[in-house]
Amino acid sequence: MDPEQPCVLAVGQSQRSAKALTAVLRGPNCKRALDAVSNVANLRTGASEEQLPQDLVLRAEPIVAEDGHVPGVWLGIFGQRVPLPDRGPVLAFRWNVTKGLTESEIGVAERLHMVDYGTDAGAILSVLAAPRYATGFDSVVLDRKEIPHQRFRVRARIDDAVVSGHVSSGSGSTDRFLSGLSIPLPEHVDGPIDGRESLDGLVAQASSRVGVHRAVVRSQDLELLHWYDEPPTGTAWRYRDRKGKSLFNPIDMTSLPSETRPETAMRRGTVRLLHQNGQYQAFHCELKPIPDVENASLATFTVVRRSVA
């Protein structure tokens, strides 16, 4: 278990969790980490913190369900001055709607196809393991039958997150799946959220790399789902209104998706983005597929502010 790499361990009878437990807890701190997990899982302690050699700190925190039991334990080994990380800025998920949302919390979480957007996958699990997450979805949307790409927005009851996604049918099966992104609300957003609203105002501004802008796109049509950072200055794309020209030059729209395949590690080149003056401006770009168990429908899209043409 590497320092500053938190994980989540499932508690209970789960073969997948047992394998994860064996793989994660190795090295000289294994016994102490196991003891901390056991104590926290049995509610003998709340959040646990223990000093380790080499100025490291072992921290364990229970994931407590509404009925009081602990389906999982969040665990991390950190340098003394490293604070507990938040639960991650963006979560990607794929949920089997046909089989229901009423299964055990950790069981549901284990079947999610989680995508790492620069946050630890264990931190994602620690959020999704709570049963409150399931009740945040719009049941009306989930009950509709003929909406292969219906987009929606709801406010989840855990961590004040906004979920944007669509319902689709599984390839070669009759099951229906809920896929999408979960993005925490900015602190200044208050009050109820209309399920019909777009992702307006949810631009993340977390990047410290000046001049670099990252987004999540759907690789088939280059639909921009979420910017990690502010979009490049002057670009005409808005979260709320995209009925006009595409942000991408049409030529780029036909060439970039063909390169987004699981076997393609990355593609670098140029892309032309629509400027507010109505012209297209060229940028350095990088398109990298995000690995997914089922498909490669998502990709990270990175552009450099400095134009190249």
Image (cartoon, rainbow, N blue to C red):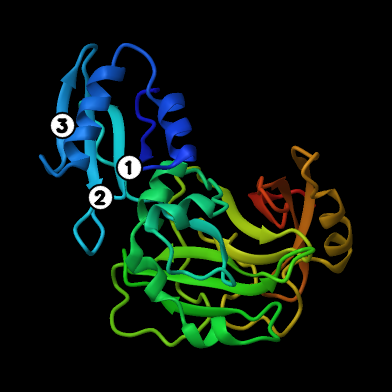
Q: Choose between 98 and 142: the one closer to the eye.
A: 98
Q: Amino acid at mark 2?
A: Val
Tell me, for residue 70, which label it has, or none: 2
Residue 161: percent from left, percent from top: 38, 67
Tell me, for residue 11, which label it has, or none: 1
Q: Amino acid at mark 1?
A: Val
Residue 269: percent from left, percent from top: 80, 45
Q: Earlier in the sequence, mark 1 or mark 2?
A: 1
Tell me what residue is drawn at x 30 percent, y 35 percent. 75
* Disc 2 + disc 3, Cβ < 8 Å: no
* Quarter residue 41 falls in: top left
Residue 82: percent from left, percent from top: 26, 32
Q: Is residue 215 left or right of residue 274?
A: left
Q: Amino acid at mark 3?
A: Glu
Query: From what the image shows, is residue 237 above or below residue 111?
Result: below
Q: Earlier in the sequence, mark 1 or mark 3?
A: 1
**Spatial separation of the CA atoms under disc 1 and disc 2:** 7 Å
* Disc 1 + disc 2, Cβ < 8 Å: yes
**Spatial separation of the CA atoms under disc 2 and disc 3:** 18 Å
Q: Earlier in the sequence, mark 2 or mark 3?
A: 3
Q: Quadrant of the N terminus?
A: top left
Label 2 neighbour load within 10 Å: few <14, some 14-19, many 20+: many
Q: Is residue 129 left or right of residue 245?
A: left
Residue under label 3: 49
Q: Is residue 264 left or right of residue 180?
A: right
Answer yes or no: is residue 300 visible: yes
